[in-house]
Amino acid sequence: MRLVLVLGFLGVLCGVAYFVFAHPGVEQLDRLERELDRLAAQNDELAARNEILEERILALRDDPRLVERRARETVGLSREDELVFVFESEQEEIRVRVRLMVGEDSLQLAGRPVELHELSQALEALREEMPRSLLVVSVADGVGPIERQRVMDLVDASPMAPAVVEN
């Protein structure tokens, strides 16, 4: 009888230990608690952000100086007694034309000789040096169609594309 009671007690003790330490619900509880902590931190961050936005809204609604400044900046409004100077906008930026001369046996990029196998790197370097430049390709009459196509393929694959082609 005593043995049965001891075994029963040990069985209950093992069952409780299993549910406390090894049950899958314990891992899930830990994961959910971490998720809850992360969401609480995110909620605090969003609440602080909302508070800042609410202050800005109130300032825009209640501060006439801020409203006036915003109207001047965004819409270009002015007071009746102010003299407004309107300057013409600058014309479109002038693009520098850089010439690639394709001869029968030579290539010249911006007046400098370049080999065909170095043309891609030279065009990339040119784009870095002169980002708003326009490439003009001049092909001599004696250049064969295959050589011409090789050069144009390199130009089209480069950051200088699209280029203007002159014959």
Image: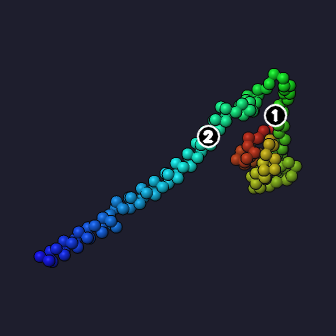
Tell me, yes or no, if residue 143 can be seen here.
Answer: no
Q: How many marks?
A: 2
Q: Where is residue 60 in the image (x, y as percent from the top left)?
A: 67, 33
In the foreground, 117 or 67: 67
The residue depicted at 19 percent of the width and 75 percent of the height is 6
Say what amino acid the circle numbered 2 marks.
Leu
Q: Earlier in the sequence, mark 1 or mark 2?
A: 2
User: What numbered label is drawn on residue 53?
Assistant: 2
Q: Position of residue 15 (x, y in %)?
A: 26, 67
Say what amino acid the circle numbered 1 marks.
Glu
Q: Position of residue 114 (x, y in %)?
A: 82, 54
What residue does disc 1 label? Answer: 92
Could you say whether the residue bearing mark 2 is in a helix, strand or loop? Answer: helix
Tell me, yes or no, if residue 84 can be seen here.
Answer: yes
- Position of residue 84 relative to residue 47, above or below, is above
Q: In which quarter of the image is the C terminus?
A: top right
The residue depicted at 38 percent of the width and 58 percent of the height is 28
Horizontal arrangement in the rendering, residue 140 relative to residue 26 (left or right): right
Horizontal arrangement in the rendering, residue 43 relative to residue 136 (left or right): left
Q: How is the image coloured?
A: rainbow
> Are there few (<14), some (14-19), or many (20+) residues within 10 Å of tag 1?
few
